[in-house]
Image (tube, rainbow, N blue to C red):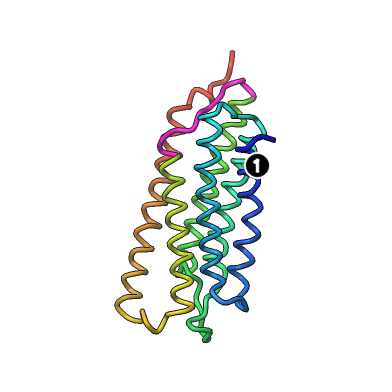
């Protein structure tokens, strides 16, 4: 197993760690630790790809690990932010970081749907011995997804530890920033999917 593959594997192993710290309310600043672990996992996505390309270490195993790691990382982050309530300074009446809940649910469905569609397209292409390379739109989409989720992990930490210090206008501004990031992420997710499908529409043609 080469270095990029080991880095991809480390990203997979970081997923249960950041999930644990996000859920472990008994650990001081657990959500901050979760955010940092998630950010490190996101950085390894760039790192393994850069090393693999620069050192010509691209392998089928690496493509598999990288794809699985990215999808599970993103979906684990969204599920936590949508489904797990956060309590202001340990109080009651908690809401998840992404609220209303249906907003996060819609975003998660769009992101997951995009990944299923692209994965299915690549399977069809592979059956025809056609290699579909990633495009710039997909990379930009991934960056926005990572940035948006890191922001919400940071927001969850701030709300849980310092809610009464940001209550009011400051919290409203933070929520608006989050919604803007979510909107940009959804738009880029849809655009990247559309561009990828249009650019590779030849894959759908039946061979005669």
- Image quarter where the N terminus lies is top right
When the figure is inspected, residue 145 is found, relative to residue 52, above or below; the finding is below
SS at circle 1: helix
Residue placed farthest to the bottom in the image?
91
Question: Residue 110 versus residue 174: which sits nearer the camera?
Answer: 174
Residue placed farthest to the top in the image?
208
Left or right: 167 as drawn, with respect to 70: left
Q: Residue at x 52, y 65 (%)?
A: 81
Is 10 part of what is drawn in magenta? no
When the figure is inspected, residue 28 is found, relative to residue 197, above or below; the finding is below
Tell me residue 180's x, y (percent).
34, 59
Question: Residue 86 versus residue 24: which sits nearer the camera?
Answer: 24
Tell me residue 205's x, y (percent).
53, 22
Q: Locate residue 167: give its quadrant.
A: bottom left
Left or right: 24 as drawn, with respect to 107: right
When the figure is inspected, residue 110 is found, relative to residue 194, above or below; the finding is below
What residue is shown with label 1?
A: 6
Where are the magenta residues, as a range?
A: 127-138
Q: Residue at x 57, y 43 (%)?
A: 116
Q: Main secondary structure of the magenta part?
A: loop
């Amino acid at each position: 197993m080469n270095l990029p593959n080991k880095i991809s594997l480390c990203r997979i192993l970081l997923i249960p760690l950041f999930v644990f710290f996000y859920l472990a309310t008994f650990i001081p600043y657990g959500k901050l630790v979760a955010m940092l672990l998630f950010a490190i996992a996101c950085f390894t996505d760039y790192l393994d790809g850069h090393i693999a390309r620069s050192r010509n270490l691209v392998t089928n195993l690496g493509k598999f690990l990288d794809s699985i790691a990215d999808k599970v990382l993103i979906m684990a982050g969204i599920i936590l932010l949508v489904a797990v309530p956060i309590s202001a300074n340990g109080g009651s009446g908690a809401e998840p970081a992404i609220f209303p809940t249906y907003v996060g649910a819609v975003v998660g469905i769009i992101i997951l749907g995009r990944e299923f569609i692209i994965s299915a397209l690549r399977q069809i292409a592979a059956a025809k011995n056609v290699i579909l390379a990633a495009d710039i739109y997909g990379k930009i989409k991934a960056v926005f997804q990572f940035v948006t989720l890191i922001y919400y992990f940071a927001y969850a930490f701030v709300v849980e530890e310092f809610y009464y210090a940001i209550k009011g206008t400051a919290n409203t501004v933070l929520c608006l920033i989050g919604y803007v990031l979510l909107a940009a992420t959804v738009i880029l997710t849809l655009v990247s999917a559309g561009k990828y499908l249009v650019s590779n529409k030849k894959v759908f043609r039946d061979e005669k």
